[in-house]
Every structure is written in C-alpha cells, then in structure tokens.
Image: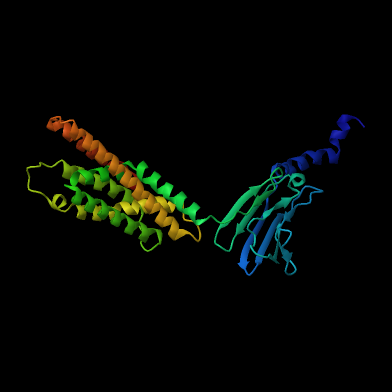
Amino acid sequence: MTVEQGMRSPTARILPLLLLASAPALAHPLAPTLLELRELGDGRVAVSWKASLLQVPGADVAPVLPARCRSAGSPRSVTDAESITRTWTMMCDAPGLVGEAIGFRGLGDAKIDGLVRVTLADGRLIRGVVRADDPLISIPEPQRHFDIASTYARLGIGHILGGIDHLLFIAGLVLLAHGRRSLLETIVAFSVGHSLSLALVVFDIVRVPSRPIELLIAFSVFLLAVELARDPAAPPSLPRRRPWALALAFGLLHGLGFADALRDIGLPPGGAALALVAFNVGIELGQLAFVGALLVILAGLRQLRINWPRWVLRVPLYTMGSLAAFWCFERSAALVR
C-alpha cells in the first residue's frame, strides 16, 4: 500500500482527529492528592484521603501515617466523576500527632504533588505541599510561652518604631506637656487609651474598619501640630491645660490602628491573651525608648544655649503638620477607591 493509499484509509483519517481530541487531556496536569487529619480528642484522629481517578499506570500513591496509630474502623469511600475520597478514624496515643511525620509515598511515580492539612486539638492548623523529593511534613510542638511572649514583644516594638504617624503624635505629646508630672500623666494616659482599644478589637468586642481609622490617626497628628503651632501668648486651650485628656482620647484611636496590625499578624491558638499582652508591652517599650531618646535630644539642645529664631522652632511643627495633611489626603483617596 502506497503512502497516498494509506492516507486515504478510514483509520488514517480518524487518527488526527483522535490526537486533537486527546491533546487537552494529555496537556492537563494530574490533580494533586489531598490528606486531611483532624484530632478529635481522646486520641482519635479523623482521616480523609482524596485521590484523583486519573493516575499514571503503575503508580502507587498512599498516605504515610504515624506507625503507632491504628485504624479504628473500616474506611468509607465516596466516588465522583474525577476522584475518590476515603475516610476513616484512627487511634493515636498521646501526644497525638505532635512530633510525627505525615505525607505520601509514591509521588514520584505518579508525577503529582500532595497536599497535607492537619487540624490539631490545640487549634493549630498545619498545612503544606509535599513533593517526591520532600514527601513528608513534621507536626511541630506548640510554641512555648516564652517564645510567644518574646516574638510578639518584638513585633510590638517594631510596629511602634516603624509607625511614623504614631511617633510624630508621641513627639507632639512630649512637646505639649509641661513639666515632669504633666509628661508622665500624658504618656500614661496615651498608654491606657491604646491598650484598652487594642484589647477590645483583638478580642472582637469592638469591630471597626481599618481605613477610616488610619485617616483619623493622620487627622489626630494634624490637629496636634496645629495646637502646638498656636501663639504661646494666646489663652491656653483645653489640650494645653489637660494634655492627658487629649492623649487618652486619641490613644483610643491609635490603639485601633495597633489592633489592625496585630489582627493582620494573627494570634497563636491557645496563647492569644499572652500574645496580646506581649505585643502591648512591646509597644510600650518602644514608646518609652522613643520618648527617652527625644528627651535626651531636647536636653542637649537646651545645653547649647542658642537663641534660636522663632521660625526655626516652627519648622518641625510645620513639617509635622504638612506630613499629617498629606496622609489625610492620601488616606481619604484610599477610602473612595
């Protein structure tokens, strides 16, 4: 049979159509396999294993579970058009799944990845993607109290020292207060205010949207700059007479901003209260360090005994107000996007 005759045969005409029809299937990646474990208490662990019905011939994928765990009943299977899901319960002695390695074998032959999701009795969720070259994940021990406290204290210090708007407001409070007692009352009032609102939001007692709060924080810095720029010969306003009252009111506002940052970071299961306290302590430590550095700088400038022109003294205040005004416009624009 010549080539031309072969091309005229029914099989030759159908073969290209079959190849075209099968091309999407050949190009479609094989679905990963999924293993879910959930600790139920009393040593019981619910297991769910989902695998695709489309597999590489000869592949033998199976979950790798702790050897000391034993099955506590026959598995049940549910099949749909694309996959089969097997569920069963197993018994694991204390300490449950902590410290164990979990994953899959046979991923290399199957040319797929595996997804592992483990929900522990202490509320922690462990998730990971395992591959042929790294087929297991280890279930870590829960964080120690010291680790939680040190981690969140560092986060608190970093947040306050990295927040220029918060630092400018604190600097304004230092300039607004007159005398050591007034300064102490003002700083304490600010701390009480932001600690209270931080706790209320983190424990979901109060819910507020973040963007309006960020705008109001910028506005508080602007108002404080305007107050500091007033003519010293003018009759003293309420913020001048009672700077602690201003610090307390706006401290509540700034605490909502701190809470938004902590909410983004997240709290560890079983250690939320400790993490909140440590984060707030970190904010206080960073705040005190900043106030101390500012007081040293101001004391050093006074020792120079230079008769500064009035406009020089106003430059920091106008800079503070200009930055705050810019933030107000910027954050207002973000509200309408």
Quadrant, the C terminus:
top left
Q: Residue at x 51, y 59 (%)?
A: 269
Query: On the picture, is 191 further left or further right than 127?
Result: left
Between residue 208 and residue 162, name the one nearer to us.
162
Where in the figure is residue 102, as x and y percent of width and height?
A: 68, 54
Q: Is residue 176 visible?
A: yes
Quadrant, the N terminus:
top right
Q: Residue at x 68, y 49 (%)?
A: 136
Name above or below for residue 325 compared with residue 254: above
Q: How many marks?
A: 0
- Residue that sits furthest to the right in the current view: 1
Where in the figure is residue 107, as x and y percent of width and height?
A: 73, 47
Query: On the picture, is 160 further left or further right than 317?
Result: right
Where in the figure is residue 42, as x and y percent of width and height?
A: 63, 70
Between residue 22 and residue 249, name the one nearer to us.
249
Q: Is residue 336 visible?
A: no
Name above or below for residue 287 compared with residue 311: below
Colour style of the rendered protein structure: rainbow
Q: Residue at x 35, y 56 (%)?
A: 198
Name above or below for residue 169 compared with residue 193: above
Between residue 294 and residue 2, name the one nearer to us.
294
Where in the figure is residue 45, as x and y percent of width and height?
A: 66, 65
